[in-house]
Amino acid sequence: QLQLAESGGGLVQPGGSLTLSCAASGFTLNYYGIAWFRQAPGKERARVSCISRSGLTTYYADSVKGRFTISRDNDKNTVYLQMNSLKSEDTGIYYCAAQNDRRLCTVVAGYDYWGQGTQVTVSS
């Protein structure tokens, strides 16, 4: 009943762009900080970006700084991840996660809700 659902993934050539969406059902996202994680084949799930409840504070992993932008529209109960200048190493399953401990980012285990993921493949 309480769910996050990612969408917007797909196959993109290097240098291309995608925008991912994370929509909440059954709860109101404005109470939650949201993070995007990704998991490449054979690798651990890694934090990509976080956004505060208000949307005023953000975090980006060094690997995506300057290329990715996280944003939220609380009226639409949705968080976005705009990904530009995509590289092959950006390939993976992208997950959104929600936590209400009032911190910008927290550890993986601290997130209360997770989506099922959306596949992003960056390849020629």
Image (tube, rainbow, N blue to C red):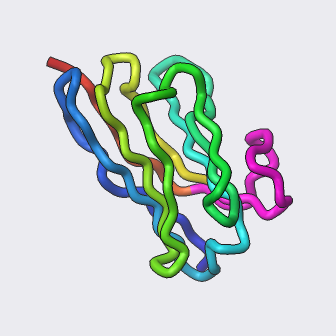
Residue 35: where, in percent of width, then height? 62, 48
Quadrant showing the N terminus: bottom right
Q: Where does residue 25 sit, x and y in percent of width and height? A: 53, 77
Q: Magenta includes 109?
A: yes
Q: Which residue is situated farthest in the right direction here?
A: 101
Compared with residue 71, is residue 83 higher up or lower down, i.e. above or below? above
Location of residue 68 in the rendering, given as x and y in whole percent from the top left corner: 43, 36
Report the side of 46 relative to 71 (left or right). Answer: right
Asked which quadrant contains residue 90, the reply is top left
Q: Nearer the viewer, residue 118 or 71?
A: 71
Q: Is residue 77 above or below residue 34?
A: below
Quadrant of the rendered structure where residue 36 is?
Answer: top right
The answer to which image quadrant residue 99 occupies is bottom right
Above or below residue 14? Residue 5 is: below
Q: Nearer the viewer, residue 59 or 88?
A: 59
Q: Residue at x 45, y 22 (%)?
A: 41
35 to the left or right of 84: right
Residue for point 59% across, 82% down: 26
Q: Which quadrant would the C terminus be assigned to in this image?
A: top left
Name the one closer to the observer, 48 or 73: 73
Please state the horizontal and vertical placement of residue 110, each as a whole percent of the image: 81, 49
Residue most extreme to the front: 56
Residue 7 magenta: no
Q: Which residue is drawn at 83% across and 60% down?
A: 102
Depth check, front residue: 116 or 31: 31
Numbered range of the magenta stretch: 98-114
Q: Is residue 47 above or below residue 87?
A: below
Query: How many callouts does the rendering have?
Result: 0
**Residue at image x 48%, y 26%?**
64
